[in-house]
Image (tube, rainbow, N blue to C red):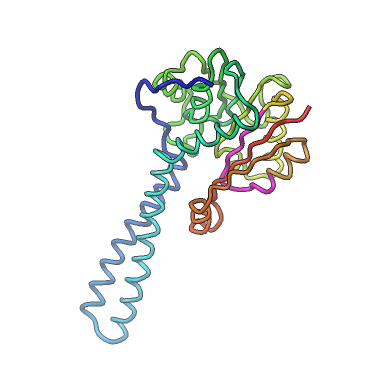
Amino acid sequence: MIGVSEVSEPDYGIDAPGVRRGMLIAGIGGVALCSVAVTAAVRATGAVATVSGWAAAGAALLAIYGLGMAAYMTYGSRVGKRHDRERLLDLADVVSPLTGCEAVLDVGGGRGLMLVGAARRLTTGVAVGIDLWRAEDQDANMPEAPLDNARREGVADRVSVATADARVLPFADRSFDAVVSHWVVHNLPDAADRARVLDEMLRVLRPGGVLVLADIAHHEAYRAHLVERGLGDLRILDGGLEAAMAGALSGGTFRPKAIVGRRGG
């Protein structure tokens, strides 16, 4: 396995920019409300002071939650997910070691986080990324972004992208040695569509090839479906305490985990 040093700093964007913006607005609103409530509590007496004090406490919690989640999402998008990428690809290399000449598909690759990470581990192989390039899933999401990041990380000659729907991948059966996907499948609200994407990933994966599926929800449904379809040697990367805390703070809607496995014959 051969790595390539970075030529210049890549930009893998902010995930779920609308959600982060909402958290930031909530946090700022909480600060403003807390300031007003504290002022009222200081100036008032009796029941009004008590109510204002409780309002200040609630607003402070809102500020802490909103600003904290916005900061966490920013850190995760800018720094954390690049570390997670390497952990996922390292685990994939354990399940099915890369020689450097493989064909890798990144499903819903956005700005190229996994696509470029996989390409860095190739020598004569190729990494292909597909997406519908929706800006609500990732800021400035467009086909040029992953190609620019590939250039910045020195792997432009190993990377290509295409516009395609993950539910109907435009590739022949058993076309790829590895299929990767990072925080994509949950964007489909219908369970049948999510299962269809998993089936498509397995369809284009060669026997003995490795699947890396990272997402923020629906993990048990993914695991059960993939096992039923013959994915073996499963490894689960559960994210540990950080993922558990993120899940608790988000009401269970954001808990990053990953499934890595090898397709049977």
Q: Residue at x 51, y 18 (%)?
A: 159
Question: Where does the magenta region start and end?
Answer: 210-222
Classify 127 as above or below 83: above
**Residue 103 percent coordinates (x, y):** 61, 19
Vertical placement of 53 versus 234: above or below?
below
Residue in the image at 54% along x and 21% along y = 1
Q: Is residue 84 above or below residue 47?
A: above
Residue 27 versus residue 252: which sits nearer the camera? 252
Where is residue 225 shown, x and y percent of the image? 74, 42
Residue at (71% x, 23% y) in the render:
206
Q: In this view, does 214 lie to the left or right of 203?
A: left
Q: In the figure, residue 59 lies in which quadrant? A: bottom left
213 horizontally vs 25: left or right: right
Which residue lies most toward the left here? 43
Q: What is the quadrant of residue 163 in the picture?
A: top right
In the rendered image, residue 187, in percent from the top left (x then y), is placed at 58, 41
Q: Quadrant of the C terminus?
A: top right
Q: Quadrant of residue 232?
A: top right
Relative side of 118 to 231, left or right: left
Q: Is residue 136 above or below residue 116?
A: below
